[in-house]
Image: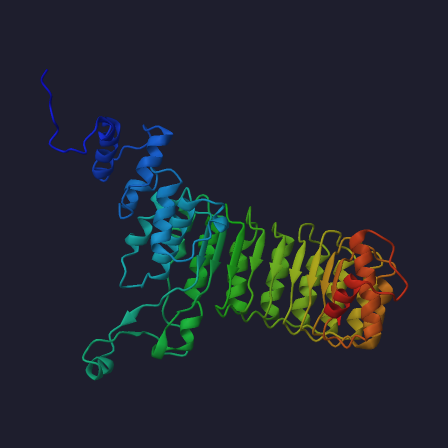
Amino acid sequence: MRRFFAEDPNWTLDTVTPLSDLCLQSIIEHFAEKPIFKELSPTQKDYVQQRLSTSLPLHVTAGLVDDGTYWERCCRERWDLCDVSEYEHSWRRMYLERHVESAIELYIPQVTDAKDVLDLVPLCKNYIKRLDIAQLLTPVKENQEEEEEQDKLSLVLETHSDKPCVDRFNFNTMLHHLTCLEELHLMYRVKQCGMNFEWPMFEMTDTDCENLGKAVKSCRTLKVLQIHLSKVEDNKCRTLVRYLLDHPSLKVLDLSHNQIGDRGARALGKLLGSSKLETLTLYDNSIGDPGAKAIGHALSKNPRLWSLNLALNRVQDDGGEALVSGLMKNSLLLHLNLAANELTTRTAVALHEALLCNNSLKAINLSGNNLGVDGVKALEEMLHHNTSITELDIRLTEAREKSASVIAQALLANQRGLEPKKSTTEDSEVKDAVNKAS
């Protein structure tokens, strides 16, 4: 009998690579030239996703490779923090959204070719639901004096005037193509500007505002618009409102940390009367009584708004009473935040009267106002009749400990759906609530 011996003494038939695996390895090696994916079985797709190069061009992978291991590898190789739960547990959505955000944040007008950003739109538009832009750069120019001092190696931002004279990325060129976009968060600022710091780096220009307004109007799917730290003042606010009127889907508008005054607030009052807004946040602006009156008047006619935040403004009792008057005709508002204004006992007493007939409001924040002992007492008496209020923040309002205790017990009773307790006996839950209230 003749016998054959393998050259490799460790060779066995069991270690022969199956032909199917060789085919899959060939697909992986030539994926950029001839991508094959949809024809594979689920097991084969997993095999390919685990081995594909993460440096493949986006135009090859974006619409072809399913959400899964490949996109998770792409995300983890590029970013240290990857919370996929913020992206509906979609790794592909996370990668494409953050990739587009980065392209916009690094776009330099007059230097970067806008086509580099716009070419991403057809590839990503079906997967982008939210854009969170943390900076928008201004154009740069060579500064001759700095070049001589630093061997012609420095570039400085072109911000030499008191007024911003440069415009940022034009969202009007792309937003209408993002047919799934629901949230847009913007900050018109420059991060890590170092020694080149100038105040105009931290505000949008009139042209920026006009372009953004047109872009938002054309984006019919947008539900949330947030603009922070961009020095949006009255004129820019009025420009934005002009484009937001009758928007078919916008439900949340957040213009916190800006410079909106009474004229801007009047425009926002008109917006409340002709839009589908459900949440309006104007935290940290410069709104006074005239603006609060306009919003209060709109509140009495608005059938949709359920959350209003006017904390850290300049509202006094005239404006506070106007807002409270709007509550008497409003049956939908659930959350009202008037913290850190200039309200006193007058507003607290007016709120007492309004909440005797308003059973829709659930949460009120009056912290940081000078309500005084009488004002807090009026709120305490109101809670003996109103069973809908479950949150009432009266910290830093000169509330006495006894009143704070009674209010805390009444709120706990409302949360449990019980009659308010009249005894002063406190269990552990009451003590915690008292500490928060006082």
| Residue at 14% from the left image edge and 33% from the top image edge | 8
Is residue 160 among what the camera can see? Answer: no
Q: Nearer the viewer, residue 138 or 390?
A: 390
Q: Nearer the viewer, residue 186 or 324?
A: 186
Q: Position of residue 196 (x, y in %)?
A: 34, 77
Q: Relative to residue 390, is residue 97 drawn left or right?
A: left
Q: Nearer the viewer, residue 427 or 235?
A: 427
- Which quadrant: the N terminus? top left
**Which image quadrant is residue 189 in?**
bottom left
Q: Residue furthest front?
A: 1
**Which image quadrant is residue 339 in?**
bottom right
415, above or below 202, in the image: above
| Residue at 85% from the left image edge and 69% from the top image edge | 378
Q: Residue furthest top?
A: 1
174, above or below 355, in the image: above
Q: Residue furthest right?
A: 423
Is residue 128 among what the camera can see? Answer: yes
Q: How is the image coloured?
A: rainbow
- Which quadrant: the C terminus? bottom right
| Residue at 69% from the left image edge and 53% from the top image edge | 302
Q: Position of residue 386 (x, y in %)?
A: 84, 57
Q: Position of residue 266 (x, y in %)?
A: 62, 64
